[in-house]
Amino acid sequence: MQGKFIVFEGLDGSGKGTMLALTAKWLFSNTEYDKILLTREPTYSGVGRQIRKILKSDRDPLDKAKLMLTLYLEDRKEHLEKVIKPALQLGSIVLCDRYKYSTMCYQHAQGIELSKIIALHRNMLVPDITLILDVDVDIALQRIAYERKTREKFESKSFLEEIRQNYLKIPELLPNENIKIIDANGTIEETFAKVKREISKVLK
Ligand code: TMP
């Protein structure tokens, strides 16, 4: 069986983590795939750890844009070669929490030219499907506040608003990739029904 590369994207508080876990469980019970890999970017190994440290300590979302871009790219290349591609070759479904679209939306909001970010990803593996979970920023902030008290680098309202708008433009910018915007403002059940519908199409 051929592997499938499925990416979940969206703001923190969009419900990505919940959808990822539900999707893994559903695929495991309802398909013949016997290997399902849950993974994420930034990773927690090597460069990924360095990124996580910066995200925790920095307060200004515009700070260190170029450095962050370099680190995300390095982390992604390693993740692809060491984790994602080997898993796909074994026939796994790879469910990845964030990928290149996060760099396109967040680092562009940090001031880096979008065309440059797109060009830097030109030779990287394109997912079979990418689901962008779209939520109102107020809902995302409520969910973040409910889950934890501390805010990270990118969690101011105006910055999140900009990132949301960047995400909404992604499907038009990359028309040859299979990218779906999913309305994730509703209940978990409502959003998951939409997620299942889209993923079912690429498993046929
Ligand atoms: P997480 O909260 O989903 O674990 O992601 C950590 C933060 O990293 C999140 O605020 C988004 C940010 N990020 C980028 O700015 N660019 C990227 O390429 C990735 C993968 C994440």
Image: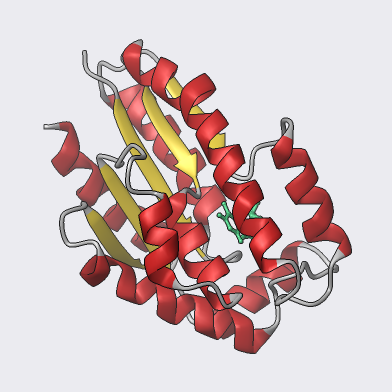
At a point 37% along the width and 68% down the height, the residue shown is 115
Q: Is residue 167 left or right of residue 78?
A: left
Image coordinates of residue 21 in percent, x first then y, are: 51, 39
Which is more toward the observer, 131 or 109? 109
Whether residue 33 can be seen here:
yes
- Residue 4, compared with residue 13, is above or below; it is above
Image coordinates of residue 53 in percent, x first then y, are: 83, 50
Total number of numbered discs in the rendering: 0
- Residue 202, compared with residue 149, is above or below; it is above
Q: Quadrant of residue 111?
A: bottom right
At a point 44% along the width and 31% down the height, the residue shown is 25
Whether residue 184 can be seen here:
no
Image coordinates of residue 1 in percent, x first then y, are: 21, 13
Q: Is residue 163 left or right of residue 23?
A: right
- Residue 118, compared with residue 161, is above or below; it is above
- Residue 202, compared with residue 180, is above or below; it is above
Q: Is residue 71 left or right of residue 15?
A: right
Q: Quadrant of residue 148?
A: bottom right
Q: Residue furthest bottom?
A: 158
Which is more toward the observer, 110 or 56? 110
Image coordinates of residue 186 in percent, x first then y, are: 42, 71
| Image region (quadrant) for ligand 1 | bottom right
